[in-house]
Amino acid sequence: MAATFPAPPRRGVLSAVLALNKQPGQTSFDCVREVRRIYGERRVGHAGTLDPMAQGLLPLCLGGATRLIDHFHQQTKRYRCTVRLGERSDTLDTEGVVTAGGDAAGLDAARVADALRGFVGEISQVPPMHSAVRHGGEHLYELARRGEEVERQPRIALIVSAELVSFRPGRVAEADLDVECGKGAFMRVLASDLGDTLGAGGLLSWLERTRYGPLDLAEAHTVEELRELADPTTALLPPEVAVSFLPAVFLGPPAVTLVRNGQAVFLPRVEGGLPQGEIRAHAATGELIAVGELTGFRFRPTKVLSS
């Protein structure tokens, strides 16, 4: 069940989160550009690129909430995808040059599910050339478009869970997966590596992001839906959506004033004790004021959202 949040404050400088339903063929930057136009807000950023062929949930941070994009990256994402076994691609998906792999006719659901279980946990992935990973100040996809290929170092990626939803056998077989993962995991690499493990090769033929942190695709809006709304701000969520996984404390008016000025404050003792480490601080009205570090009773803001 999707989390629910109160509407963001509609006064002052815009600071909000938008759950966007990206459609196939759109780039993530296409979506950012359109949302800038709809809301008249220059500061719009997305929390993780979706490839043009992919669809689904693309969290966008607007205005002051762009300071919280990194906190989205700390949360897990969920995908539904289709892996085509028995074929390979230079881009690891159907956007590239597709070639024949091994014969997948001997594969069945049990064997695929067993191989998939080997990818759960911390795994090593080599970033694909057609990705937004940077090398020497450029995105890898920019180098790939010029026909260049560079050596990439393996990275550790977290696969929280990976389940086989359905399997369609054949010389070129198809496996539908449901995957939850952490930051930096590539579904295209997972598809290719799964195919190699099974001895048939594999590529990603369809991808949809269904969850990201507390956001659910069922409550996301397409760009077209936003354009049709009489008041597009009704689709916005408050900035605390990006940091809802952090413990919350509530500040009295004197402390709010000090924190808004970037100053550390001491919090009163409470029954059960105060959470330690990174927290989010709210005014008594519920408005998110800042994110910061709480050590003992001393709260030091690191990102102030309200002025």
Image: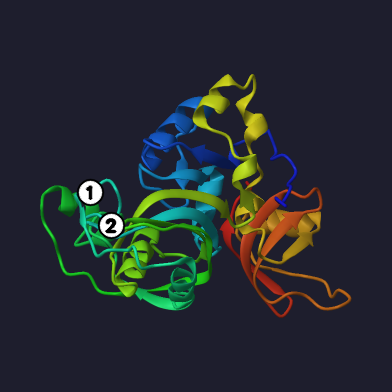
Give above or below for 186 relative to 221.
Answer: below
Residue nearest the viewer, comparing 292 with 183: 183
Which numbered dot is residue 92? Answer: 2
Q: In this view, does 29 lie to the left or right of 75?
A: left
How is the rendered protein coloured?
rainbow
Residue 139 seen from this side = no
Q: In this view, does 54 lie to the left or right of 66?
A: left
The answer to whether marks 2 and 1 mark residues whose Cβ atoms lie closer than 8 Å is yes
x and y percentages locating residue 262 in the rendered image:
60, 59
x and y percentages locating residue 99 in the rendered image:
19, 54
Extreme residue in the bottom direction: 296
Q: In this view, does 215 lie to the left or right of 224?
A: right
Q: Under tag 2, what secondary structure?
A: loop
Residue 142 seen from this side = yes
Density class for disc 1 (Cα within 10 Å; few <14, some 14-19, many ≥20) is: few
x and y percentages locating residue 193 in the rendered image:
33, 69
x and y percentages locating residue 38 in the rendered image:
51, 26
Q: Give the Cα distance between marks 2 and 1.
A: 7 Å
Which numbered dot is residue 62? Answer: none
Density class for disc 2 (Cα within 10 Å; few <14, some 14-19, many ≥20) is: many
- What residue lies at 40% left-to-right and 33% top-to-bottom? 33
Residue nearest the viewer, comparing 169 with 184: 169
- What residue lies at 62% left-to-right and 61% top-to-bottom? 291
- What residue lies at 36% left-to-right and 39% top-to-bottom? 27
Q: Under tag 1, what secondary structure?
A: loop
What residue does disc 1 label?
96
Q: In this view, does 279 lie to the left or right of 23?
A: right
The amino acid sitting under disc 2 is: Leu
The amino acid sitting under disc 1 is: Gly
Give above or below for 70 relative to 159.
Answer: above
